[in-house]
Amino acid sequence: MSDLTDQKAVSLAAIDGAETLDALEAERVAALGKKGWVSLALKTLGGMSPEERSAAAPAIQAVRAEVADAISAKKDALEASVLEAQLASETIDLTLPAPDQQVGSVHPVSQVMDELAEIFADLGFAVATGPEIEDDWHNFTALNMDESHPARAMHDTFYFPDAAPDGGQMLLRTHTSPVQIRSMKEQGAPIRIIAPGRVYRSDSDATHTPMFHQVEGLVIDRDIHLGHLKWTLETFFKAFFEREDIELRLRPSYFPFTEPSVEFDVGYANEGDRRVVGGHGDDDGHDWMELGGSGMVNPRVLEFAGLDPAEWQGFAFGLGIDRIAMLKYGMNDLRAFFDGDPRWLAHYGFSPFDQPTLSAGVGARP
Ligand code: PHE
């Protein structure tokens, strides 16, 4: 029995002196492990008579409990000091700059579409959409271009081999004007919408890409005239280019779906190699630049779309989004818009946190 008392004293001293969790674990194995001295002492009970065993067992169990308690107390103490050491060494300086985060940017075309929607929303226009894969009825026929119309050939259309549900041809829409038809058919009159989106023509050089962006505008009501069109476009361009001296020129033109038709030009000046919008196009150092087509909706188009031309009339316009983006933000090659080069985007892109609002400026740089 005194053997056990000695071993206990040695073991408790070693447990108390353990400086690491590993050293403590070694002591635990030496005492309570399968071949530890406590376990061996417990095993000796097996060879005793019942009387001897009930005399010896309480002392051995007491030693075992004392050693186990000592180990667990020491373990708590060691763990606490490890945590304290960690807290002391791993300080974080909250005043240091945060590591660089990669932040994506908004493509100028998306930014301009947001700006458009924002400005036109203030003028009471809703945003409408239509499919990019169209049928020739919506893209041409209902816009007063029947199969033999020469304007169809001028559109450089991408056609699909499969037929449309009505037997006509499927195609990539060549302009946003089919959304006029869809809006009139779906919602009836009165209407005040813009329809921004992608359009496709088989054409490619520095100022033309096979895919580009337009925004369509359509207002249908009872007493709409060309004066409303001019005011709307002028008001839009003043807000969009953020200057008051915008001059618009309406020039007689022809589109099958408007009558009369006008193209609209904006006055600009060359400053270095940059075109800056503003001023009268006939002034010194100024010229006119065409921005889009428009006119009063042709009564035949109203009929195709199910509206009574005796009751309703309105104006429509179509405008190149990429072109006004280039003008506003000073880019000169349209093809770079769609190359997907992240360096170009880093240069011209917009912060995702820069939401256009009329009060804070629609195109303010962060
Ligand atoms: N859809 C015409 C085009 O792409 C533009 C336009 C729209 C003209 C609406 C008149 C009215 O050229």
Image: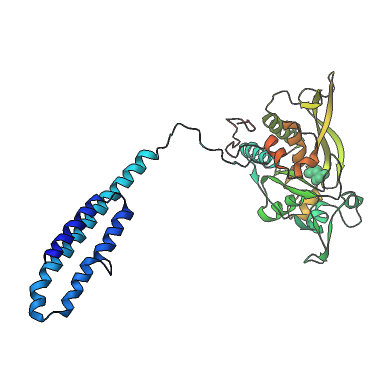
Q: Which residue is drawn at 13% across and 79% down?
A: 48
- Compare residues 235 and 338 and report the one nearer the observer: 338
For the N terminus, give its image quadrant. Answer: bottom left
Task: State which image quarter holds ligand 1.
Answer: top right
Is 236 displayed left or right of 335 in the figure?
Answer: left
The part of the image, by quadrant, that contains residue 277 is top right
Q: Residue at 85%, 53% (x, y): give it.
A: 157
Extreme residue toward the top, this view? 284
> Which x, y percent locates residue 313?
74, 44
268 up-or-down from 28: above or below: above
> Residue, x 22% and y 51% (percent of image)?
16
Image quadrant containing the C terminus: top right
Of residues 256 and 80, the one nearer the viewer is 80
Is residue 25 something that shows in the picture?
yes
Q: Position of residue 124 (x, y in %)?
A: 62, 40
> Residue 84 placed where, x, y %?
31, 43
Q: Is residue 319 visible?
A: no
Task: Report x, y in % for residue 256.
Answer: 85, 47
